[in-house]
Image (spheres, rainbow, N blue to C red):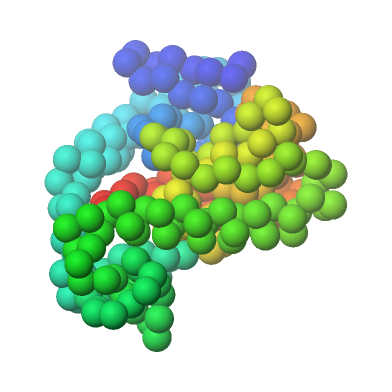
Amino acid sequence: MNALQVDDLRFEVRRSARRKTLEITVDRGGELVLAAPPEVDEDTLRAFVREKRFWIYTRLAEKEQLQKTAPPKTFVNGEGFLYLGRSYRLKLVDGQTEPIKLLNGRFCLHRELADTGRQALIRWYTEKGKDWLWRKVRDYVARMEVAPAGVKVRDLGYRWGSCGKDGWLYFHWKAILLPARIAEYVVVHELAHLHEPHHTPEFWRRVERALADFEHRKRWLAEHGMEVEGL
């Protein structure tokens, strides 16, 4: 059983022999995930969901509200922008040949580009993200016995990454806003898809072999990933 429907709530069920307890997470797009040991039966899963129903609805409401109320960034001196989990203040400058660069702990943006700062920053994130993510991919190629065709960075909507049938790995440019250890989990997750296209038990075993603490990273992403949305 890979899915479980309880009234109006639908869960992806992920089983692991290493897991001893039940756990529910709400993923970035509002998808519900129920992690469980292999031997837990469906009745027990349903009872656990009903016990946690109030918490689930609260988390779903929080995510929906966060999506609605996240204030847009303004490209003025002192505004903070994330890069690998750290916030850097913006500084408008004159005489800079590059549209934007990270210098001395600040994002320096050419003053004349303040009105189009979002596009300039997304281009910067995309370029830096491609380099950083490709380096991480290469760190795991031998360990995970994969041979990806390459990395492409773009807007993937609600997905942090995806694995193409042609062996290309696709990542959302916002992945580079995440803390490095969380972005690393996104990389490993997509590399595992080169072997297993679906979230089968074998898929999660491959992820775990590469990242022993992947459950903690996955949980952080589910609970805090939405916080990097505003730009």
Q: Is 95 placed above or below 230 here?
A: below
Taking depth in this image into account, of 99 and 36 the one nearest to the observer is 99
Q: Quadrant of residue 92?
A: bottom left
Q: Which percent across, then down, holds residue 111?
A: 20, 71
Query: Measuring 17% from the left and 40% from the top, which residue is drawn there?
Result: 68
Q: Which percent across, then down, holds residue 97?
A: 37, 74
Q: Quadrant of the N terminus?
A: top right
Query: Measuring 68% from the left and 44% from the top, which residue is drawn there?
Result: 150
**How many numbered circles does the render carry?**
0
Taking depth in this image into account, of 46 and 150 the one nearest to the observer is 150
Given the current orientation, which residue lies at the most extreme bottom position? 104
Task: Report the side of 119 relative to 72 (left or right).
Answer: right
Query: Measuring 33% from the left and 57% from the top, which residue is drawn there?
Result: 120
Residue 201 visible within the image: no
Query: Measuring 40% from the left and 16% from the top, which residue is drawn there?
Result: 6
Residue 73 visible within the image: yes
Taking depth in this image into account, of 116 and 152 the one nearest to the observer is 116
Task: Report the side of 127 relative to 59 (left or right).
Answer: right
